[in-house]
Amino acid sequence: MSGVANQASIKLVGIEPNFLLRLWRNKDTRSIILQILTMALLFAFLAYIINNAVLNLAVLGKTFSFDFLGFPASYDINQRLIEYTSQSTHFRAMLVGILNTALVAFFGIITATIVGFLFGIIRLSNNWIASHIVYCIIEFTRNIPVLLHILLIHGIIVHVLPSPRQAHTLADSIFLSNRGLTIPDPIFGEGFSFTVIAFFAAIGIIIGFARWARKVRDESGKIYPVFWISTGILFGLPFLVFLLSGSPLSWVVPELGRFNLKGGITMIPEFLALWLALSLYTSVFIAEIVRAGILAISKGQWEASQAVGLQRNRILQLVVIPQALRVIIPPLTSQYLNLTKNSSLAIAIGYMDIVATIGGISMMQTGKEMESMILVLSIYLCFSLVISAFMNWYNKRIKLVER
Amino acid sequence: MRIIISLFAAFFMASAANAGTLEDVKKRGVLNCIVNTGLPGFSYTDKTGRWKGFDADMCRSLAAAVVGDGEKVKFIPATGKTRFTLLNSKEGDVIFRNTTWTFVRDVDVKLTFLPTTYYDGQGFIIRKSKGVKSAKELDGATVCIQTGTTTELNLADFFRANKISYKPVPIESNEEARKNYLADRCDTYTTDASGLAATRATFDKPGDHMILPEIISKEPLGPVVRHGDDQWADIVRWTVYALIAAEQHGITAGNVDKMAMDKSNPNVSRMLGSEGNLGGMLGLDKEWAKRVIKAQGNYAEIFERNVGLKTPVGLSRGLNALYTKGGLQYSPPFR
């Protein structure tokens, strides 16, 4: 036995020069070798970059630390959703920036989705004029970089709209000027909480009602106008409670101060420009995604629905869109991610988002480039992961249930 | 295999070592100078695309000292936010971009600040029609600022100290700020008083706008280099001093050759290299200072040509006069 082994090892030594070549010629081992090499190169590259950064920081005499987040920021921010003064910390300034990014991304996504779905459906309508107007809007909008849209809308607001003294006004309570859109500020009096409770109660009632209506439809075929009744409950119930509790709500109406409108809530031109530009730009991509989704549904589905006597709106609502959503959701997720990331173009017009606060002024004033950029990157990553997670959950929920 | 190893070795050799900017510039034959993206009078491009202004000229003076030719300058325009990153990443050799010398920048951001070329302070510009006579009346005003600058911090301090409120509009460059101010997006624009004068000079009707009397900060503006290269810092430092000393001794671009021949003033002779070898101690040649002065003239010539009273910017020397004339510009002795 040992003799055989000996012979084998001698043989192995004999073919040693060709051993590597053999491994290379074997499909399986070759793939393993390639993978090991790729990983090694990747790690080498990462090690090089980190090593380079550490060495260069050392040469510049800089330390790597996040202590600066606790120091006073010393600058002011014009749009803040939480309490912030120039004596707050850099960390607080970063939070203000995060909230500003979240605000514009949230409103942008909602507006872009609504407008995008409308555009997508109109684009497919049989009305030649409507579909071609939307076609022109889509082609015009999506072929111009989003940065230009932002600058254009900001330019229009700042250069075309009048100064606060000559502001366009609606009922002397809503003002539109080159300082932004100013609306009255609500002040919630005592007892307003009842209205809030009523609002949530209305939502509960609507969910129950919708379930009941579906059950009735499944059993007897009787169809209630669920949408209109729900809308009625949603607005009617809280309004009734609001009146019964003695209308505990007053408004601070903006009035002209020496320089600006005083009081009220102002949406600054930078926010308006960013919100409108991002919504418009993303909505036309969503429109095309929606169109693709609807066209992906085979003609047979339409014909079958028509055959049972459904109208066009009902076909869309009941047959086509539920199936189309499965095609629409994955690319829609990318559009949401794009919108959120494009919001960093805010820097061009001075909207105080993450890039402008922690990645801009804080970085500049403290000289902590590396740390600030790492924070900005991680924050955008978190935003993207949260949006992806939500959309993946939704995608799973609506995907084809196979029986 | 050996090739691969050496490649890896080269790959891993991080571009360390901050010293040697002088060698880099000499080898390149061109000075990379970081300047403002556009501030009339200080650094801007004229119709032919040539960089002009107080700061741009000083870049040329430095290039004349180091490379021997005042035209061998590559101008790198930077905003308030990008300038230090450009310097630290070695895109530029020096910053001549109205940069304020502060404690934090000097000590914590690890920059080396060199002699102040322009003593300035922060002011406000406003339309006369707004009827404001003092910055303390600005309660509730919308204020345009250049983001990433010290003016942003001074502004917050000023309003806090006077217990009045304002709405900041942060803007990336002077040109954008000018547009927003003219469109009345903001009631007032604040930056260094010299910048305000320079910007006002470009308005259609400069007379409709006034600069408020308050100067709310000290803004010593001067060149900046990276921490840790003392030789390079010395070269930039003494180039600026040469310009100031030249004004004091009456050396101009026109008479520098004659002054170098005349050995009646030992101070002048030492500086211009006809006596001793001060240039050699800097790592340059004997005639460096001669070239500096010949390139763009002395401090007074550069000042008057770009921002002086006869230019549209119209700044008087004020604090920037020589110490002999009641100002702060003072050069240590060349010996």
Image (spheres, coloured by chain):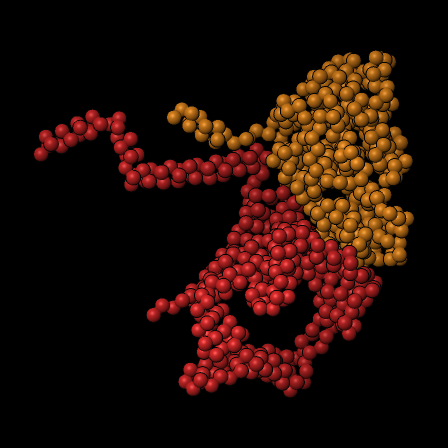
* Rendered-image quadrant of the C terminus of chain A: bottom left
Residue at the image point whose x is 73% and y is 71% from the top: A184
Instruction: Identify the colour of chain A in the image.
Output: red
- In the image, A78: left or right of B199? left
Of the pair A292 and A304, the residue shown nearer to us: A304
- In the image, A174: left or right of A23? right
| Residue A112 visible to an observer of this rendering | yes
Of the pair A56 and A27, the residue shown nearer to us: A27
Quarter of the image for residue A219 reads bottom left
Would you place residue B231 above or below residue A396 in this image?
Answer: above
Letter of the chain shown orange in the rendering? B
Residue at the image point whose x is 76% and y is 45% from the top: B175
Residue at the image point whose x is 83% and y is 64% from the top: A165
* Rendered-image quadrant of the N terminus of chain A: top left
The percent position of residue A261, horizontal first and vertical second, equals 78, 65
Would you place residue B95 above or below residue A104 in this image?
Answer: above
